[in-house]
Amino acid sequence: MESDVVVRLGEPDDADTLAQFNIAMARDTEDKRLDPPTVAQGVRAVLAHREYGFYVVAALGGEVVGSLLITFEWSDWRSGLFWWIQSLYVKPDFRRRGVLKQLYRYVTARASRETNVCGIRLYAEQSNRVAHRAYTTLGMQKTNYHIYETMF
């Protein structure tokens, strides 16, 4: 199945699916209920404004079965960009079938061709041990950082 997965950049026609994936991911990983119109607006904003980031989708037989969002963080220490993987979601029936690996390979290959990308990062819910194992299997390493936030 892994070789049948087509990975590409997200397009405006993917907006509804991406919004549905984001809502499902928040519910599955954090038991959060998101506002569908707000999420749809946020997805469309990314698709319309490349400076916000970009989506990567994995399709099988024309059906989008997984996706992730890349956003950017400038590092003055490295004079380069970190690409942050966010909103990662694979439909339940397609998990453990190589979809995440294909998405990650696409992102790392694309990032390695960019002269200003210094690394790839993501954050994961602390209790999501399955995700932690998946990211380690991809070759990612756990960092010593904790994330803090102020919401508006």
Image (cartoon, rainbow, N blue to C red):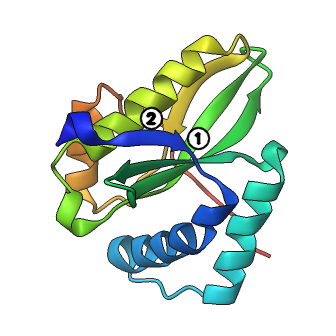
Q: Is residue 134 left or right of residue 140?
A: left
Residue 47 figure quarter: bottom right
Q: Is residue 10 above or below residue 150?
A: above
The residue lying toward the viewer, choosing from 33 and 100, is 100
* Callout in the foreground (1, 2): 1
Where does residue 32 sit, x and y in percent of width and height?
A: 46, 83
Q: Secondary structure at mark 2?
A: loop
Work out whether residue 115 can be spotted: yes
Q: CA distance from mark 1 to mark 2?
A: 16 Å
Q: Amino acid at mark 1?
A: Trp
Q: Secondary structure at mark 1?
A: strand
User: Residue at (56%, 52%) from the top-left corner?
Assistant: 147
**Quadrant occupied by the C terminus:** bottom right
Task: Characterize the local packing of mark 2: few (<14), some (14-19) or many (20 or more) Cα atoms within 10 angstroms.
Answer: few
The residue lying toward the viewer, choosing from 27 and 64, is 64
Where does residue 45 sit, x and y in percent of width and height?
A: 79, 64
User: Residue at (71%, 83%) from the top-left corner?
Assistant: 38
Where does residue 57 sit, x and y in percent of width and height?
A: 48, 50
The residue where tag 2 is placed is 144
The residue lying toward the viewer, choosing from 27 and 50, is 50
Task: Characterize the local packing of mark 1: few (<14), some (14-19) or many (20 or more) Cα atoms within 10 angstroms.
Answer: some
Q: Is residue 8 above or below residue 96?
A: above
**Quadrant occupied by the N terminus:** top left
Q: Amino acid at mark 2?
A: Asn
Where does residue 63 sit, x and y in percent of width and height?
A: 37, 61
The residue where tag 1 is placed is 84
Work out whether residue 150 can be spotted: no
User: Residue at (39%, 28%) from the top-left corner?
Assistant: 105
